[in-house]
Amino acid sequence: MSQDIWNAVDSYFLSKLMPPDEALEEALRASEEAGLPRIQVSPAQGKLLHLLARVHGARRILEIGTLAGYSAIWLGRALPKDGRLISLEIDPRHARVALANINRAGLTDVVEIRLGRALDLLAVLADERQEPFDMTFIDADKGSNPDYFEWALRLSHLGSVIVIDNVVRAGGVADPANDSPEVVGVRRLVDLMAAEPRVTATAIQTVGLKGYDGFAVALVVDEIEPEAAT
Ligand code: SAH
Ligand code: DHB
Ligand code: MG
């Protein structure tokens, strides 16, 4: 069992369940053409995010790590017309490609890309005291996952869902010899989720076009107290 069969099965489901889609395909083409890394979620994963957002009735979504806007298109399409997806991206080149892709997908009014270090932008978001997010997708530099999780929690409400991509990393998370910053970031994230009484969480291993990896899902099960103004 390996990559060839995983690809074939992903392609099979793709051909049956995800009809050809101009905006998504164009987004991938533009990303490729601009030389961006090919690390966006797979079509099946993108559709899962989309379905999760719809099942949840999300109106406000936060994404950390935009890249070319591929996952943002899937998530943005799950929102009602007056919904909002705020996506954070550090690389201006990525943000530029993403903005064009979002516009082509007809999501200009729903998706907002903010440029900068996610940790800085998250502090700004907290200062703005906007409504909390119903859903957060964490998919940026994996070493910062623990910080991103803490911020996502602060910006959540009872019932919000937090999804974290790439928590398996070809099994690295359970390999005691692997102490890369990415894997350490994931383990610290998992420890945080385990110790945090305000969430209940699981993690799912996946195979497919993105190799062997996985994602975690946390549900906020307690009130998040609004912070006192400073
Ligand atoms: N969610 C996207 C993929 C994101 S790839 C999709 O599935 O389509 C990770 C992105 O996070 C990259 O574009 C990278 O530039 C961005 N990133 C890395 N470190 C960051 C940081 N500190 N702050 C904000 N974005 C960051
Ligand atoms: C990498 C990052 C991702 O977000 C992903 O889905 C796959 C790989 C990476 O940095 O290697
Ligand atoms: Mg990812």
Image (cartoon, grey):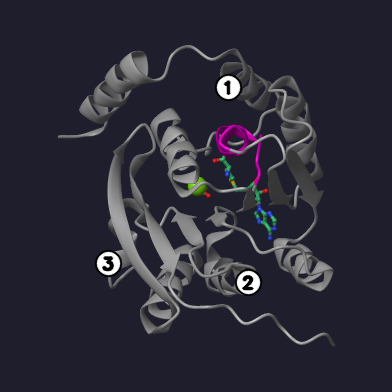
The residue singled out by tag 2 in the image is 151
Q: Helix, strand or loop at disc 3? A: loop
Residue 64 seen anywhere in this rendered image of the structure:
no
* Label 3 – label 1 distance at C-alpha: 35 Å
Q: Helix, strand or loop at disc 1? A: helix
Label 1 Cα crowd, 10 Å radius (few <14 / some 14-19 / many 20+): many
Q: What's under tag 3, amino acid-wise?
A: Asp
Lower position in the chain sequence, tag 2 or tag 1: 1
Q: Are marks 2 and 3 in contact (CB under 8 Å)?
A: no
Lower position in the chain sequence, tag 3 or tag 1: 1
Counting from the top left corner in percent of width and height, residue 70 is at: 59, 33
Q: Helix, strand or loop at disc 2? A: helix
- Against 179, is 137 above or below? above
Which residue is more in the foreground, 208 or 138?
Answer: 138
- State the extent of the magenta-drawn residues as a range: 66-78
The residue singled out by tag 3 in the image is 175
Residue 42 inside the magenta-drawn segment: no
The residue singled out by tag 1 in the image is 24
The image quadrant where one finds the C terminus is bottom right
Counting from the top left corner in percent of width and height, residue 54 is at: 48, 40
* Label 2 – label 1 distance at C-alpha: 29 Å
- Callout 3: CB less than 8 Å from ligand 2: no
Counting from the top left corner in percent of width and height, residue 157 is at: 57, 69
Residue drawn at x 39%, y 84% as measured from the top left: 195
Which residue is more in the foreground, 3 or 96?
Answer: 96
| Numbered circles on residues, count | 3
Instruction: Residue at the far left: name it.
Output: 1
Q: Is residue 42 left or right of residue 176?
A: right
Q: What's under tag 2, amino acid-wise?
A: Trp
